[in-house]
Amino acid sequence: MKLCLVTPKYYRVKRGQTLSEVAETFHTTPRLLVLKNNLTAELWEGQILELPPAGNLYRVRGGESRSMLCGSMKAFEEKNGTRRLYVGQTVVL
């Protein structure tokens, strides 16, 4: 028997939840949640969010490049919604 992790496609925000908490729960970054849902304000209770595909989160260390982390600069940008890369940043691999 093979076990699979099933990630929901949508999520209803609970009272008091922050963008960072929701992102951490679903193994994504706040930036990707903002981009996926065109967010311009704080989350509110009952709001439905579309979740990006879950990924492996990684904290960037000195000397690493976008190509080194994701195979190419284009892949990095597609997975993370940005070209920026800095030490301490949390990215999706």
Image (cartoon, grey):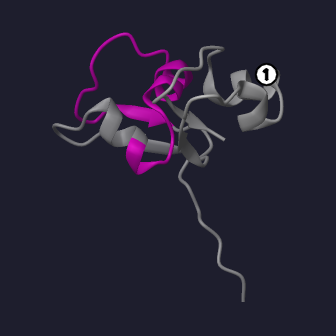
Disc 1 element: helix
Percent position (x, y) of residue 30?
43, 29
- Residue 30 vertical placement versus 4 (above, below): above
Q: Residue furthest front?
A: 63
Nearer to me, 38 or 61: 61
Q: Which quadrant of the figure contains the N terminus?
A: bottom right
Q: Residue furthest left?
A: 16
Percent position (x, y) of residue 15?
17, 39
Nearer to me, 67 or 46: 67
> Would you say 34 lies left or right of 65 here?
left
Asked whether 48 falls inside the magenta stretch, the response is yes
* Region of the chain picked out in magenta, as a range: 24-50
Percent position (x, y) of residue 21?
31, 41
Asked whether 54 falls inside the magenta stretch, the response is no
Quadrant of the rendered image containing residue 70: top right
Percent position (x, y) of residue 75?
78, 28
Task: Please give the residue where the numbered disc 1 appears in the rendered image.
Answer: 73
- Residue 63 vertical placement versus 21 (above, below): above
> Would you say 29 lies left or right of 91 here?
left
Q: Residue at x 16, y 37 (%)?
A: 16
Q: Residue at x 27, y 19 (%)?
A: 42
- Residue 14 vertical placement versus 74 (above, below): below
Q: Residue furthest bottom?
A: 1
Q: Which quadrant of the figure contains the C terminus?
A: top right
Label 1 amino acid?
Met
- Residue 59 vertical placement versus 37 (above, below): below
